[in-house]
Image (tube, rainbow, N blue to C red):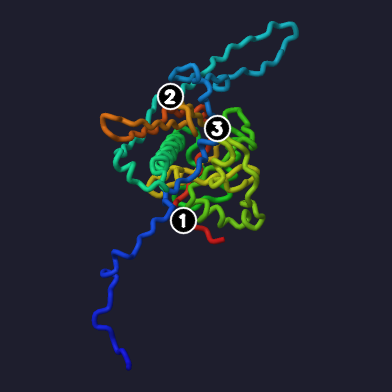
Amino acid sequence: MAFDSPTDAFTKANMDPFIKEVWSPIIHDLKQANMSILNFATDLSYLLTDGGDVINVPNIYTNTFSVQTQSTEGAGVVDESPAPANVTLTVNTHKYIAFVIGKKTMKQIAAQYTLNEKYASQARDLLVAAVETSLFALVSSLSTTDVGSGTAAVTDLAIRQGINTLQNTDGSVFELSKMAFFWHPTVYWNQILGISKYYEKQKSGMQPVKDGNFGAAAVSETYMGRLYGIANYVSPRVPVAATVVSNMLLHEDAFAFAMHTDGTNGVEVATDYLVQNLAWLTVVDIIYGVACLRAGAGVTILADEEETLNG
């Protein structure tokens, strides 16, 4: 006998007491860009092992000797005493992230989730990003801040002009091997890789990463190969004002930082059980400072974020 249609079939709502819920072991965390400029800039943290808050970095290039010619034999030499200059790096910025999880909640969280550790790791990444942002903000301290145009896409000429600037500035010739480009992702993917002379010669191909302050792994996702023998790094923290992107070509002497905190990447993590609060308190903090040590050791390569180049 045919059974045309049920009139009172069990529904999901009826069977809810018997349908189990499954919790994935995966926790989706914040996706952060790896280090770029922090792994490249000069690290002066080692100078703070005995304390202190101001690091003085003298230079003898601002005022230099003059090469003399002896016009008359036997005449006395002309001595000189060019005045040295000084740059200071103050380490007094203290940033932190803190969170509290009650004892009851901590006990109830499934054992498969190391939630406190996950949150601490995320906080560490956010503080490292804050230091990188501070370093990139030093762009306004550079001597040359207007190579290229903020109303057009970046060009090969602007890139070559940037390199030329660091080969002809303040009497110094900076080593190509110690330079690096820092591009905003939009500029790199929408403009740089649209310049045919680069992709046709495969100049954007990956090459081994030289270890920086925190090791090769710290920059593995931001390193984009070499251009004219110079390393390329991509970071969303490259400054953008309106649509004007301040990409940079830097020598490693240009910017410096120092950290007064220990721990992974200079970030300290401390967790303590507060019996009076029946809760676990975790504080993640960093004490640091940044400075432009050599204004002539970097160039800003401007570009309009909205422009694109078809490869």
What residue is pinned by disc 3? 297
Please tell me whether residue 39 is drawn above or below residue 21 in the rendered image: above
The C terminus, quarter of image: bottom right
Q: Nearer the viewer, residue 109 or 250?
A: 109
Q: Nearer the viewer, residue 180 or 74?
A: 180
Classify mark 2: residues with Cα within 10 Å, few (<14), some (14-19) or many (20+).
Answer: many
Eye-nearest disc, 2 or 3: 2
Residue at disc 2, secondary structure: loop
Q: Nearer the viewer, residue 47 or 263?
A: 263
Disc 1 or 3, which lies upstream in sequence?
A: 3
What residue is pinned by disc 2? 91
Percent of width and height locating residue 29: 42, 48
Classify mark 3: residues with Cα within 10 Å, few (<14), some (14-19) or many (20+).
Answer: many
Residue at disc 1, secondary structure: loop
Residue extending farthest to the right is: 73
Mark 2–mark 3 Cα distance, whole angstroms, equals 22 Å
Residue drawn at (71%, 13%) of the image: 70
Residue extending farthest to the front is: 1
Q: Type of residue at label 3?
A: Ala
Say whether residue 153 is left or right of residue 273: right
Percent of width and height locating residue 37: 51, 38
Percent of width and height locating residue 287: 41, 27
Disc 1 or 2, which lies upstream in sequence?
A: 2
Please tell me whether residue 221 is drawn above or below residue 41 in the rendered image: below
Residue extending farthest to the left is: 7
Please tell me whether residue 44 is drawn above or below residue 39 in the rendered image: above
Whether residue 139 is visible to the viewer of this picture, yes or no, is: no
